[in-house]
Image (cartoon, rainbow, N blue to C red):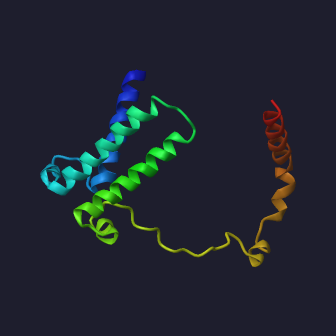
Amino acid sequence: MVGGFLGATGCLILLGAIRVITGQPLQLATLGRFADTTTVFELSAACAMAAVLYLTWHRSRTPIGLPLILIAGTIAAHVAFWLAGISPADAQALGWTFHPPQQIGLEWPWSVQALAHYPWSTLPELSGNLVAVIFVTASSTSC
């Protein structure tokens, strides 16, 4: 049972990775899109990076190893883009790199006016639970 669970988990991780890498799910209806040369190159680059991670990370488990591998992979990708004549903007437009996140503003989850509508009458009923949570947290952190 545990083997089946781990196998299914691995399959879901693999299918999710393929969807993130190619931008399309691996299904019978989309199988034809995986014959595109760009998709083949994307999957090949991902497999090469996975092989490098597997071969190097398992041999040296230094704390700086994984960040160095990821930085080297990023530099290698950008060198490959440069050699292929692809600008960073074109690489991003083609789906080779991530798009920057949208700018968002900070919004407070509460306001001073909302405090007037808070159900203050429930606090005495919850005080026992609050003391229990504090006690359990304090006792679990001291062990």
Residue that appears at 30% across and 42% down: 48
Please provide percent x and percent y for residue 88.
34, 68
The one of 25 and 43 positioned closer to us in this rendering: 43
List x then y, in percent, for residue 19: 30, 51
Q: Is residue 44 above or below residue 115?
A: above
Q: Quadrant of the N terminus?
A: top left
Q: Quadrant of residue 14?
A: top left
Image height check: is 65 above or below 121?
above
Residue at 78%, 65% in the rendered image:
119
Would residue 9 be visible to someone looking at this image?
Answer: no
At 45% from the left and 51% from the top, the residue drawn is: 71
Q: What is the quadrant of residue 90 in the picture?
A: bottom left
Q: Quadrant of the C terminus?
A: top right
Residue lying farthest to the bottom in this orientation:
113
Q: How many numbered discs, if any?
A: 0
Name the residue nearer the viewer: 89 or 10: 89
Seen from the viewer's position, the closer of residues 116 and 102 is 102
Q: Position of residue 92 (x, y in %)?
A: 33, 66
Q: Residue at x 17, y 51 (%)?
A: 34
Q: Is residue 11 visible?
A: yes
Q: Nearer the viewer, residue 109 or 36?
A: 36
Left or right: 79 in relation to 61: left
User: Which quarter of the figure has residue 53?
Assistant: top left
Query: Is residue 33 positioned above or below 86 on the image?
Result: above
